[in-house]
Amino acid sequence: MESITKNRQPVETLRAMVARAYGPEQVPDAGEDWVSELGHGWFNVAYRIRLRSGAQVVLKIAPPPDVEVMTYECGAMATELAALRLIQENTKVPVPAVDFADQSHELCDADYFFMSYVDADNLNVIRDTLSRAELDAYDEALGATTRELNRIRGAAFGPLAGPGESSWRAAFLRMIEELLGDGERRGVDLGYGYDVVREVVAAHADSLDEVTEPRFVEWDLWPGNCMVRDGEIVAILDHERAFYGDPLMEFGFTASELSAFGDSAAFIRGYGHEPFTSSERVRRRLYNLHLVLVQIIETNFRAHTDTEQYDWACERLRETIAMLGEHASRRQQRRPDQSHR
């Protein structure tokens, strides 16, 4: 996927990174076909590299410092490294091993790290080739995997590295406000006034008070970040959006209140979640609101060259606000235009 956040580096720099991480003896000979870009991600650039020994590894590089990212994405690589440590120390969920991380900015202008290469299929890439039974089995496994991740407890709500909040309501409202602030700063048209969105969230914020224990939330655990082989999940990737919050905010639950995202039945079955209470349904709708705001506003920060994602997410925002009640219908709604670019 193409994005201006991808911090591509020349071959000479990549070779220097390999030497620092693995030693000069592992730098591939010049002219060999030893590096290729992995194109599935949206945020960081990632390279598949074959060392001189023949071993394969992956190099991830954070965005360049002169590219503005969304507020919640600041320090994302440090978040991913922290998440990987937590997962490896507290669960049996398979994740790549981190071989080396460098935050010195001596070789390039951003953080980077090397991790093991996972020789497997991306679940999102192969979904169209799978039977319904196979898809359900993978979705159930994703549910069980997500539940295991959610067992990790935190000391406060919010970013893994802090600063944290004592209540989930305060943490989630800050997440929403950061998103809206990003959108307002860039002049992104939501199709609603920003004050309307704030009022809709405030009208339902009481439901957040039921969440009293900070739990690890992967949030971005969708099929595109799941590697599979022989019917098994062999690795979960891209942990830079993890935080401590309400497990119900996990992506796998999204379709339970917004059918455009698919069918969450198999995921929920694998997770082992009981039928949602009315308050849980309200919270899930608030989390859908957060998700579609991200999807709308990031199109500006990523400099998308078409409006496909923007248009789709704006429609989901209209559906979600309608599901949260008639609070917004009393205010004049504007149709989105092209001013989000």
Image (cartoon, rainbow, N blue to C red):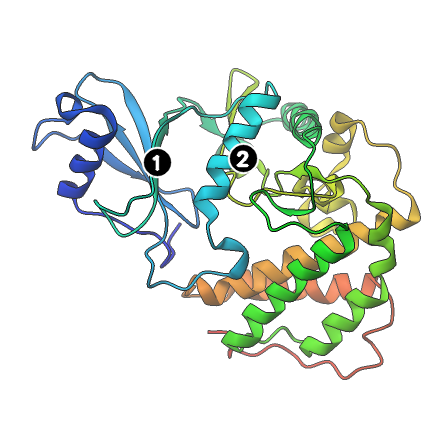
Residue under label 2: 83
Q: Mark 2: few, some, or many residues within 10 Å (few <14, many ≥20)?
A: many
Q: Is residue 197 left or right of residue 86?
A: right
Q: Element under label 2? A: helix
Q: In this view, does 164 lie to the left or right of 42?
A: right
Residue at the farthest left position: 30
Residue 45's spot in the image, x, y percent?
34, 45
Q: In the figure, residue 194 lies in which quadrant?
A: bottom right
Q: For the residue marked with disc 2, what is the amino acid?
A: Ala
Q: In this view, does 201 lie to the left or right of 325?
A: left
Residue 241's spot in the image, x, y percent?
55, 45
Dot label at residue 113: 1
Vertical side of 286 occupied by 303: above or below? below
Residue placed most toward the observer, 157 or 39: 157
Residue 60 visible? The answer is no
User: Mark 1 and mark 2: span between their CA atoms?
Assistant: 14 Å
Which residue appears at 20% of the width and 39% of the height? 14
Q: Quick one: label 1 or label 2, which is nearer the N terminus?
A: 2
Q: Mark 1: few, some, or many residues within 10 Å (few <14, many ≥20)?
A: many
Residue 193's spot in the image, x, y percent?
69, 79
Vertical side of 83 occupied by 199: above or below? below
